[in-house]
Amino acid sequence: MNIEELVKKQREYFDSGVTKSVEFRLKKLRALKGELKLREGRIHEALKADLNKSDFESYMTETGLTISELGYLEKHVKSYARPKRRLTPLAHFHGKSFTMAEPYGVVLIMSPWNYPFMLCMEPLIGAVAAGNCCILKPSAYSPKVSAVIRELVEAVFPPEYVAVVEGGREENAALLEQRFDYIFFTGGVKVGKLVLEKASRYLTPVTLELGGKSPCIIDETADLKTAAKRLAFGKYLNAGQTCVAPDYLLIQESVKEPFLELFEKAVRQMYGEKPLENPDYPKIINEKHFERISGLMEGMTLRMGGEKNQETLQIAPTVLDFATAEAPVMQEEIFGPVLPVLTFRQISEAEAFVKEREKPLACYIFTRDKRRERQLLSSLSFGGGCVNDTIIHLATSRMGFGGVGNSGMGSYHGKKSFETFSHEKSIVKKYNWIDLPIRYQPYTKGKERLLRLFLR
């Protein structure tokens, strides 16, 4: 079945009304959870093949989070789908007001390679919970995971309901020529702009989950030992190939040296003296990205790491000291295990540095000064983040996750996923036993006085 025919079949299936039944949606979500648990081992094997992820990391960041999201929406989808009463203004007497969530229809989900399972399945869960039909487009850069996603989806859904389209640029281009009712894209800014441009042809609403250079700010009051461990975890998880990874460190000059000593120690404790020999240390997705990251390190001052293995596509956890705003490594999102270090004397310098740049997807602040915490949280614009930790803000179904400005638009997770893939209709139901004449012509001074009273 070609892509155009597939979209047509899904539209026919959606128009049949089958997916609008909440019980039907719940049945499919439960079936998906059951099949996912049965195939967990195969999913982890695919993640190992594509990214060298360990079973532990695969469960922590991919399958475990997906199962958690499934459980959360399974519990709440009935209440989310139920019509909600709203207060009715006096001018609408006598009537009642309510909102209804309706699915958009046929949606497209385009996912990336860095968390290839979770970032494909979590949007799908929201789309199905909201009652949509869906086409999934996994990344061609993670072919093993793409194959297990297709097998999983085919075991649960008929293709006219949910289908997986594998392939590369040709398939991406063909999909973006179709008319969808919603597009959900996770990836880089460059392709995100193309998706938005293509969506504008049909005024298709979109969610763009992009990225950017997410700063980590550490001031002199921070608990340096804890900050070192938590930054090392967030930065080098998945070999730095995380959209919300701390991209660069802004540290107060007075604590730079003691912090970096603690940071190096934390990295050694986590990955060993020779990280490239650690069987649980992930690899860079492909040679193209390996070469790109290697190029960003050239001419920089190596404080730690820098070892590379081109055969295994691995780069050791690396710290680049004395980085400058003009350095190539500061001109693009690194998306790898390389941490440039910049310093500031006053917190206002760090604040200004972040504000002068595009709004990041995440921001991390390590401080024990509550006034400074409030100042930075209120003055800096970013998608989401943490105080005294890194990346964990996205690992919950109880808060939305998304970007702002150059780092994206829209959000998802839990209730936000349901809302993202739903249109909220506003309804006023008027009763017939009374019909106030105020709105009808002829307009009189008396009617105008009443109107002003109602709309005051």
Image: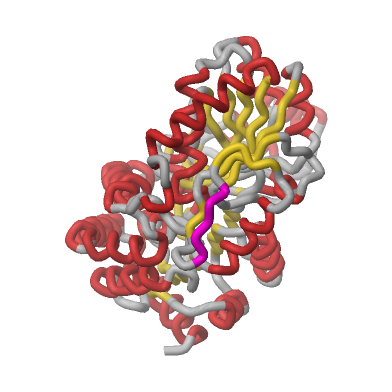
- Based on the displayed image, in which of its 4 quarters is residue 373 positioned? top right
**Residue 239 makes an appearance in the image:** yes
Q: How is the image coloured?
A: secondary structure
- Based on the displayed image, in which of its 4 quarters is residue 293 positioned? bottom right
Residue, x 52% and y 48% (percent of image)?
240
Residue, x 47% and y 82% (percent of image)?
8
Magenta-colored stretch includes residue 309 = yes
Q: Residue furthest bottom?
A: 1
Nearer to the camera, 169 or 69: 169
Q: Quadrant of the N terminus?
A: bottom left
Magenta-colored stretch includes residue 163 = no
Q: Position of residue 2 (x, y in %)?
A: 47, 88
Q: Quadrant of the C terminus?
A: top right
Nearer to the camera, 333 or 254: 254
Nearer to the camera, 252 or 210: 252
Nearer to the camera, 157 or 189: 189
257, above or below 23, in the image: above
**Residue 244 makes an appearance in the image:** no
Report the span colored magenta.
306-310
- Based on the displayed image, in which of its 4 quarters is residue 207 positioned? bottom right
Residue, x 48% and y 43% (percent of image)?
236
Q: How many marks?
A: 0
120, above or below 335, in the image: below
Q: Position of residue 6 (x, y in %)?
A: 44, 82
195, above or below 404, in the image: below
Q: Position of residue 197 (x, y in %)?
A: 71, 67
Q: Position of residue 141 (x, y in %)?
A: 49, 70
Residue, x 64% and y 38% (percent of image)?
248
Per the picture, the main secondary structure of the magenta-coloured stretch is: loop
